[in-house]
Each structure stands twice: as structure tokens, then as C-alpha cells.
Amino acid sequence: MDTQGSILNRLPPRKPHEILEELAARTQASDNDLFLLTLHLNSGRDVKGYLTGVEEKTSGGSRAVTLRPADHSGFATNDVFYVMMSSIEALTVHGAQKAVSPLSGGSLEVPPGGTPPTRLDLKRRAEEHSRLLAEKLGHALAVSVEWDAFPSSDGAMWALKEQLDALEKAMIRTASDDLGRSELSAKVREVRLSAAGMKSCRIAGGVLSVALAAESGGKGRFSADELEKEIERLL
């Protein structure tokens, strides 16, 4: 069986409202993540469209769900459909391989296509990030990985690549103004990545330490947005 089909078979059973919340959160975080669903309503009607939002939880009552209906070619129309979550009996997620991470609550992830990076590839990548960040901050900045305790699986190598790239984006954003650049320059002289049971971020002794659960899918590492918030919280 193909890799994507195998991963879909491992998706955990979850309640429709949990799936809708996860997919809506991903959609709100990235304009590129639009998920095509079919909502199966209690009335027996089916509505197919792209999820755009789920109303935030309130003290009581059902919440609203919005989506843009799809036309016969699968493209989103200029209409918006509003439905109460309590009237949704079931849902179908089309092209579910794209949604593996939110569907699994972050515990599973489809590996990117192509050959996984090697340790040497990632060491070179870390050096490139180090040079770029040093230019942004105006002083030398080492980016290193604690390789001795880092898993060597393909999934772990992909996870480390994604974390290195997210780290670069987060630090560049933080250093985009004078105050952020000044705080980073004063408090961070080295960045060190490591494997752990859960993701974490801390600054101590001039070292920004970022730990990731390298074999736990998307939930085991920081996105660029999450890492930016963590770094700014620590500065």
C-alpha cells in the first residue's frame, strides 16, 4: 500500500465537531489551507464546500459553521453557507492526505515527497541559517544540533529540517525591528536544537534551546508562528 494510504488507515476516530475545529484553526492560520468537505446533515441533505470557519465556543448553545459551496467542477463559488454544528451528523474530508496532521490532532503527518535529508544536508542547512541570522543580528550566531541523542529515522530528519526552517523565519521576524533585534543580540549568542519527549523552548546563558519530539508529527515541533511567540515571550 502507498505511504499516504497507509497513514490514512492510522487516523484515529474522532467526533465531527473536533475535526471541524481542527480544520478551521488550520485554515485561519494559513490562507493556503482550504479543506473540501461534505457535510451530512440531520435532515438528509449533503452540502459540499470549502470550510472557512467555526464559531468560537460560548457558554451554551450550538455553534455556527461556515463554508463556501463547491460548484460541479469543485471550485468554490461566491456563496457562503451557514449551518449550525448541531445539525451536522457526519462529514467527509475530501483529499484527506492533505489534512492528516489536523485530522490526527498532530500525531501523524504525511512525509514530504522526495528523498529525506541526511545529517550532512542538515548540518549544511544549519550553517546556512547561522550565516543568515548572523547578518541580521550583526554578530556571530552558531546554530547546532545535539546529534548524539537525535533519532536517525526519515521522519525525524524531515522534522528537523522543518524546525530549522521555522526557526530561521521566527528569528528573522523577531529581529525585524530595532527593539527585537537589540533584545535578540543581547540575549542569544547560540541556538541549539535537540530531541526530547515534547517540544520546548528556553533561553539561558546566551543559548536559545529548542527541543522537538522529532517522531511525533506536526505536534512535536514548533511552527514559525509558535516559535516567534515563544522567543518573544522569553526575551
Image (tube, rainbow, N blue to C red):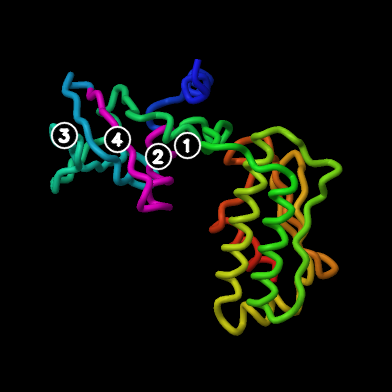
Q: Are marks 4 and 2 in contact (CB under 8 Å)?
A: no
Check disc 2 and report its element: helix, strand or loop: helix
Q: Residues within 10 Å of mark 4 (few under 14, many from 20)?
A: many
Q: Which mark is residue 102?
A: 1
Q: Amino acid at mark 2?
A: Leu
Disc 2 target residue: 23
Residue 73 got which mark? Answer: 3
Q: Residue at x 32, y 46 (%)?
A: 53
Task: Work out whether 24 lies above or below 2.
Answer: below
Decide if residue 219 is on the left or right side of residue 134: left
In this rendering, the count of numbered labels is 4
Q: Mark 3, mark 2: which one is toward the viewer?
A: 3
Residue 57 or 45: which is nearer the viewer? 45
Q: CA distance from mark 1 to mark 2?
A: 6 Å
Q: Is residue 227 visible?
A: yes
Up/down of 39 relative to 21, above or below = above
Magenta residues span 18-41
Crowdedness of circle 1 by 10 Å Cα count: few (<14), some, many (20+)? Answer: many
- The reply to whether the magenta stretch includes residue 29 is yes
C-alpha separation, residue under disc 4 versus residue under disc 2: 10 Å
Residue of label 4: 36
Mark 2 burial class by Cα count in 10 Å: few <14, some 14-19, many 20+: many
Relative to residue 59, is residue 87 depicted above or below? above
Secondary element at image label 1: helix
Q: Earlier in the sequence, mark 3 or mark 2?
A: 2
- The earlier-in-sequence mark between 4 and 1 is 4
Q: Is residue 58 visible?
A: no
Q: Nearer the viewer, mark 4 or mark 2?
A: 4
SS at badge 3 = loop
